[in-house]
Amino acid sequence: MSGIVSEQTKSRDEIVAVGRSLFDRRLTAGSTGNISMRLSDGSMLMTPTNASLGDLDPARLSLLDGKGMHLSGDKPTKEAFLHSCMYCERRSDNAVVHLHSTHSVAASILADVSPADVLPPLTAYYVMRVGRLPLVPYYAPGDAELARAVQIEARKHHAILLANHGPVVAGASLREAQYAIEELEETAKLFLMLDGKNIRPLTSQQADALRK
């Protein structure tokens, strides 16, 4: 029992630290964005609804069981289903970050991107941290169809972009998920900056070698 309590305490502090870092660097604003961690007993710690990632209280984080039932803490984010869908398909991942980061959202609104892979392989680090980035069609917040669409993509991808909404990224650890979503945001920024210019992305052979 003491081990679980210690794990919870450490995870709560980590969520608060990562949330503050993301907020302070303007990767999320207001009460947008949410973070979760899956604990060794299958339960999930998650940021509460209507909470700023820059001002989280570790004691008030939402605790849910493995089936998504609220156990303690404040009411969980209304986007909790996004996290549950990722964990359901990605057994080796133990953290999920979802942001409404500006450049990633902008890329999700463009009409001429490939829904199979939104961003080109501009850098090696993007390919290594993100891989391919599928686009899930727009659904209204809370729509059960969004949950099903995310779950399908999560079977093959740990990073997913929601149309007119933002990215959802899973990782083996919270730091891995954080670094991947930050790399995604920076690559989306590059992509928008280079619009209309002749670019030289990695070749398909170079990108495939990095993915392996």
Image (cartoon, rainbow, N blue to C red):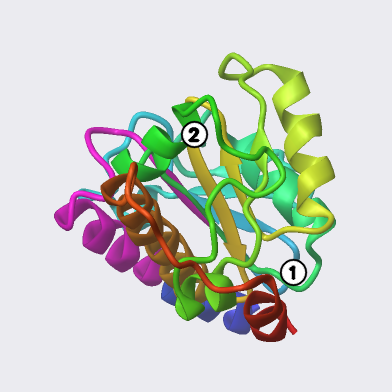
What kind of element bears circle 1? loop
Q: Which image quarter: residue 115?
A: top right
Q: Which image quarter: residue 17?
A: bottom left
Q: Position of residue 160 (x, y in %)?
A: 62, 48
Badge 2 density bin: few <14, some 14–19, many ≥20, Cα 10 Å: many
Q: Which residues are magenta?
A: 12-36
30 magenta-colored? yes
Badge 1 density bin: few <14, some 14–19, many ≥20, Cα 10 Å: few
Residue position marked by numbered label 1 in the rendering: 41
Q: Residue at x 39, y 59 (%)?
A: 187
Residue position marked by numbered label 2 in the rendering: 108
Q: Which image quarter: residue 50?
A: top left
Which quadrant of the figure contains the C terminus? bottom right
Frontmost residue, 103 versus 19: 103
Q: Residue at x 74, y 31 (%)?
A: 147
The label nearer to you, 1 versus 2, is 2
Under mark 1, the amino acid is Asp
Frontmost residue, 21 versus 14: 21
User: Which mark sits nearer the N-terminus, 1 or 2?
Assistant: 1
